[in-house]
Image (cartoon, helix red, strand yellow):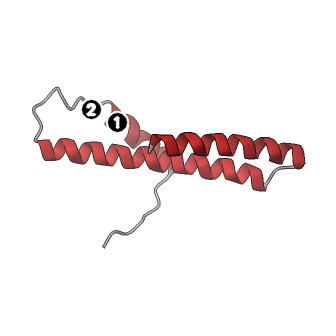
Amino acid sequence: MDKNIKIPLGLLNKAIYVLEHIDMDYISYDQSIKADYDSVLFAFYKKKESLSLRGSYAKIVYAKDEDARHFARMEYLQQKRAYKEDI
């Protein structure tokens, strides 16, 4: 059974940074390790995008006025569209 855990955003960003700088072609890794590497890095990217999208939505909820809410909503929809295109 998979369980979700919370990790600090800074740690997520560091993990992504480290994984991005591992040269999987430098050493002859087993194909299963390469597949796991790609899977983990992809999952971390998705989580980071999801957190960003959640932050954009929060800007709509906490907007000071209607103009700010409208602008935040437009940004959110644009970001959401780009997020869905990445999938």
Tell me which residue sits at (34%, 43%) in the image: 41
Picture residue at 33% right of the left edge, 69% below the top: 2
Quadrant location, the C terminus: top left
Give the x, y percent position of residue 85.
50, 41
Q: Which residue is mark 1?
A: 18
Q: Secondary structure at mark 2?
A: loop
| Numbered label attached to residue 40 | none
Residue name at image x 58 percent, y 43 percent: 81
Q: Residue at x 77, y 56 (%)?
A: 61
**Quarter residue 23 falls in:** top left
Question: Type of residue at label 1?
Answer: Val
Q: How many callouts does the rendering have?
A: 2
Q: What amino acid is labelled 2 in the image?
A: Ile
Coordinates of residue 73 in the picture (x, y in percent):
74, 47
Residue extending furthest toward the bottom: 1
Q: Is the Cβ of the residue at disc 1 closer than 8 Å to that at disc 2?
A: yes
Q: Quadrant of residue 62?
A: bottom right
The crowding category of the residue bearing disc 2, from other C-alpha atoms within 10 Å (few below 14, some 14 to 19, many at least 20), is few
Q: Report which residue position mark 2 lands on.
A: 22
Of 8 and 47, nearer the camera is 47
User: With 84 as the anchor, is 17 left or right in this view?
Assistant: left
Residue 58: image location, x then y, percent = 70, 53
- For this view, does 22 lie left or right of residue 4? left
Rendered location of residue 4, percent (x, y): 42, 66
